[in-house]
Image: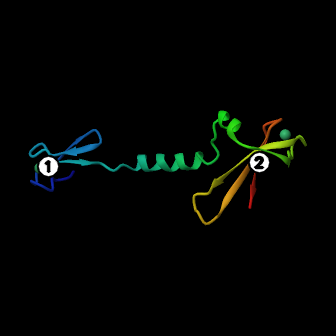
Amino acid sequence: MKFCPKCGSLMKKENNYLVCPNCGYKEKIKDANSLLLTENINKSSEITIMEEDYKLYPVDNEVECPKCGNKGAYFWSIQTRAGDEGETKFYRCVKCGYTWRVYD
Ligand SMILES: [Zn+2]
Ligand SMILES: [Zn+2]
């Protein structure tokens, strides 16, 4: 239960809002579920790159795939969230699609 900060009337819950039936004051309800959701999204988005995107990356012909031994891999780098950790370099074998990362 919450009272309207404007007029002091008892506020009613309406979807995600608390609404004052007297003066119409509206307040968004902060719920813990939405916070959890954004955290999960951040974690899973770390290495989600669309399959199509690989075609746009340059190929390093000097790099050998640790899985199949083929020479040639797409490469790109991602700035880590912390900022001071530097870049993480990724390679993806053009032949077998194996993806690995290298820390500078
Ligand atoms: Zn009110
Ligand atoms: Zn390979």
Image position of 60 (left or right of 55)? right
The residue at label 2 has a CB less than 8 Å from ligand 2: no
Residue occupying the point 78% across, 37% down: 97
Q: Position of residue 13 (x, y in %)?
A: 23, 42
Task: Give the farthest residue toward the top.
Answer: 52
Mark sitting earlier along the chain (1/2): 1
Tell me the kind of residue under disc 1. Leu
Q: Position of residue 98 (x, y in %)?
A: 79, 41
User: What numbered label is drawn on residue 10?
Assistant: 1
Seen in the image, is 93 located left or right of residue 32?
right
Q: Which residue is pictured at 65% across the width and 62% down the height?
A: 86
- Residue 100 marker: 2
Q: Secondary structure at mark 2?
A: strand
Depth order, front residue of 40/67: 67
Q: Residues within 10 Å of mark 2 (few under 14, many from 20)?
A: some
Q: Residues within 10 Å of mark 1 (few under 14, many from 20)?
A: some
Tag 2: amino acid: Trp
